[in-house]
Image (cartoon, grey):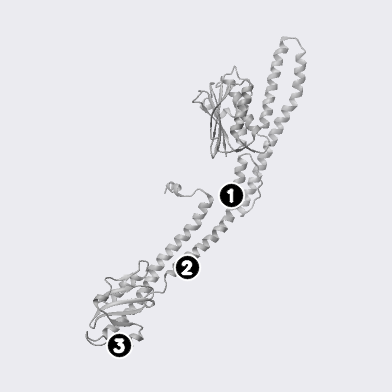
Amino acid sequence: MNFRWLKRYVPRGLYSRAALILILPVVTLQLVVSVVFIQRHFEGVTRQMTRATAREVQLLIDRLPGPDAVLPPDLIALAQGLEIDVSRVAAADIPASSLKRWYDLTGAIVDASLRENLSDTRRVALPDDYNVHVYVSTAAGLIDFHFDRRRVSASQPHQLFVNMVFFGVLMTVIAFFYLRNQLRPIKRLAEAAEAFGKGRSVPYRPSGALEVRAAGSAFLDMRARIDRQIEQRTLLLSGVSHDLRTPLTRLKLGLSLLDSDDATDMLHDVDDMQRMLDGFLSFTRGAGDVAPEDTDPCDLVERIIRDSQRAEIPVTLGDATGCDQGRVMLRPLAIRRAVTNLIDNAVHYGNRAEVSILLTEKSLRIRIEDDGPGIPADRRGDAVKPFTRLDSARNQNRASGVGLGLAIAADIARAHGGSLRLGESEKLGGLQADIVIRR
């Protein structure tokens, strides 16, 4: 069977689902027990007690005298022995209909059983939990048989439900507190994993049940391996790039002393290599080890655009929406590097760039658009990979990088727990690059 339709009605949070798993069986069990107990126990017991009382009333009815005779003393004594009050009443004094309260659980059963066992019963009145009045037409006239309610039904049946509800709620509350303590380590693990996904490393110590401790230890091992891998990659690329700077500088100095035309071409090659090394170093720096700061993203982007405009880069600020939504935890230098790389990439392949900001309660989006040739949809996944140059998509004659501009921006976005999304600009017609970061 397909239960997908049920998912829209099921809570999404772990606490809510755990509470539902805890409360639903308890409530269901109480309802089932209540219904079964009422039907099988209260009904059966009430019918038995009512039949026994009806036989005693019938015994008194059989000994009643004629309509005008006084009730004999032996009948009164017998009624007193049976704890039943017997008295004549006028037809006008009996209730218009049988009386019972709407919440009386066994009142209907008592009424039906008395009418079934006493054929001439006119009315049955159950005004409270203590008295029963049975009005019967007899040879002596209309007789009111009055006796204690405890003779026909169990006393205070509602106490069963009160006890069930009270202890059910009490045990549910106790179980909920216990369950919350069990779920707290899972929540801490989820928070640590979410923070690591956003590029932050928060203190975490495995705790809780054995399975949760095992998952926490596995997460710590995974986080340590990823940090080691990133550190080794950074040290490797940084070391290689740094070590090559010295021989390149010597080579460039030696070539500058030559006068031949070949030396000029070789100097251009050395400059290209120097730019490649600068790109490698920029890529290895990535988001760096700087801790995130509480940053105003709108102010940061505006300063980046002003600095680019001072460098005579044709970039403008477009829509800035939601700047009143507060601040965001960012690494300002890393975001500056990513946005600057995307702006340089945009004006390199196009004539101008435009930057816009959208800040909501859940995310931050920084969009850079250009009027260049753009990137085909089937090549955008390769464009964010390191050392990838899409010469067929971008103008090859103008390309002079090493294929790290988009990769650096994507790496910085991932370090903030976000992503870099590429698309087609509807406004300028070129490439649209979105840095999307969860808050």
The residues bearing labels 1 and 2 have C-alpha atoms spaced at a distance of 35 Å
Q: Name the quarter where the C terminus is drawn.
A: top right
Image: 177 above or below 45: above
Whole-percent x and y of residue 312? 62, 20
State if disc 1 and disc 3 touch (CB < 8 Å). no
Element type where label 2 sits in the image: helix
Whole-percent x and y of residue 358? 54, 33
Disc 3 packing (10 Å; few <14; some 14–19; many ≥20): some
Image: 35 above or below 66: above
Identify the residue shown where x is 29% and y is 82%: 87
Under mark 2, the amino acid is: Asn
Element type where label 3 sits in the image: helix
The image quadrant that residue 276 belongs to is top right
Q: Is residue 268 left or right of residue 356?
A: right
The residues bearing labels 3 and 1 have C-alpha atoms spaced at a distance of 77 Å
Residue bearing mark 3: 75
Question: Which residue is at the far top?
Answer: 260
Residue bearing mark 1: 187
State if disc 2 and disc 1 touch (CB < 8 Å). no
Q: Is residue 335 left or right of residue 90?
A: right
Residue bearing mark 2: 163
Identify the residue shown where x is 52% and y is 63%: 170
Can I make out residue 279 in this image?
yes
